[in-house]
Image (tube, helix red, strand yellow):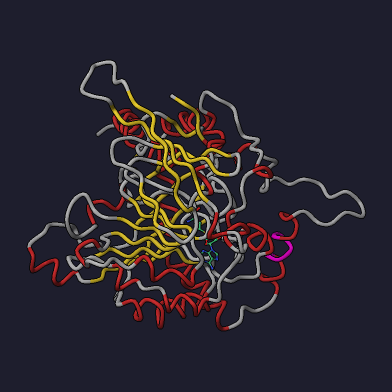
Amino acid sequence: MDASDELRSLEATGIYRLAGSRAAFVDPVRLLGESYRRFRLVPSAYYSRSFGPSRQGGEAQAEGTAPSPDRKKRKRKRQTKARELNAVERIAEARHQEARPLLISAHNSLLDAKYLLEYLPGMIKGDECRPELETSSENNFVELGGSWRAPFYEMTICFQKPLGQDEAGTCDVQKRSSPLFNRVVRVEENGEAEGEFQGRLYVLPKGSCFMTTDFTHVRDLIPDNPNTGYNLIVIDPPWENGCVRQKEAYPTLPNRNLLYLPVQELAHPAGALVVLWITNREKLRRFVEEELLPSWGVKDPTEFYWLKVKSDGSLIGDLDLFHHRPYECLLLGYINVNREAESGSKFKVLQGSQVIMSVPGAHSRKPPLQKILSEYIPGPKPPRCIELFARELGSGWTSWGNEPLHFQDSAYFSKK
Ligand code: SAM
């Protein structure tokens, strides 16, 4: 495929595979958009961070004001450089140095893809400018779910039932009410629905399923019949860390609580690919590799990187900045794959690290992974997928967490 074919493929599929490197550039808006027929995601709402004041730029600090986050980062970098790294930091630095050539090669191949770079500014802007979302008027599901009223809250779900096989596609609009918290809510396969709750509308993709609960109810997700278990299990935990911004964005969980996630019970008997997003903290990494993944039955994980770029293709920050790397890591490994091999179903076993690049959306919002990982997912096709600690829905996915409807607010969508 030449560069213009790859660009057409990005427009059609949301993925641009970069020649000569183990890397791909993805457009989450296009990938997520595949779940909708009557709605489209508004690119400028997804990529809203690209339109705000630059966090990487070098704004001058007014006298007597607090230093900007960039100045703080640069100061911390100088301080980290000035003092000797401690033993744990040295391990983290060695890990970074090991990943560096792959990350640089991936980024260089993006910079070499001239057509793609020309395409990016238009891709993130789209044709409807809506970067300023009224987030203050959105429902706060974390707070609502913690209130004594939670068991009484209901969502009115409005869906369109086709009346017959007529060409005009006439539909009958039907409504049903469903408890919103602590219950599994399923959306029919034949078209997306709209949910109404406390004066806000939510777009619910066809064939999606969600449950809004706290961690203490997570075992309610375990399927009664193991054959309805999951082949792709994506987990993006609210890791504890010192970042104040993250604390404001959502509550965190003590890391050891994750030992109680029923990952094995969720896995399909014909095999599951488990994907865990982690932070760059070395102590966390050790806990994950030595305790957490083994407790879920995941051995020998493969590491992928999500490298974050701006709309001009440059990295969102200095690659070597010790405390603020412009990339995040994800560990991928299998459960039950031996039985899968016995059953003769075909999938490619993961081998070696890869880099996924994209322009980031809202704070901590990760790019969708199903399509880019599809050839590595064991078990029946299409795979059954679940995301733990989700903030959005997708066709064919079960999304669980204390706010899986967060990015389904109609403010992020427009009608086709
Ligand atoms: N993957 C998500 C995305 O791409 O937007 C981000 C997930 S974020 C790292 C972690 C999520 O876990 C947040 O939505 C947070 O509110 C949720 N969370 C925090 N504490 C929780 C708890 N006790 N039970 C369930 N979910 C929790």
* Residue in the image at 35% along x and 58% along y: 386
Pick the residue in front: 332 or 395: 395
Residue 185 visible within the image:
yes
Above or below, 274 against 84 in this view is above
Quadrant into which the C terminus falls: top left
Label the magenta part by its dominant secondary structure.
Answer: helix
Above or below, 274 against 114 in this view is below
* Residue in the image at 40% along x and 65% along y: 276
Extent of the magenta region = 73-77
Expressed as whole percent of the image width and height from the top left, the position of residue 150 reads 56, 59
Quadrant into which the N terminus falls: top left
Residue 307 covered by magenta stretch: no
Expressed as whole percent of the image width and height from the top left, the position of residue 30 reads 40, 36
Residue 74 covered by magenta stretch: yes
Pick the residue in front: 67 or 369: 369
* Residue in the image at 45% along x and 29% along y: 119
Residue 333 shown left or right of residue 149 in the figure: left
Residue 302 shown left or right of residue 202 in the figure: left
Picture quadrant of residue 163: top left
Picture quadrant of residue 377: bottom left
Above or below, 23 against 281 in this view is above
Expressed as whole percent of the image width and height from the top left, the position of residue 319 reads 55, 57
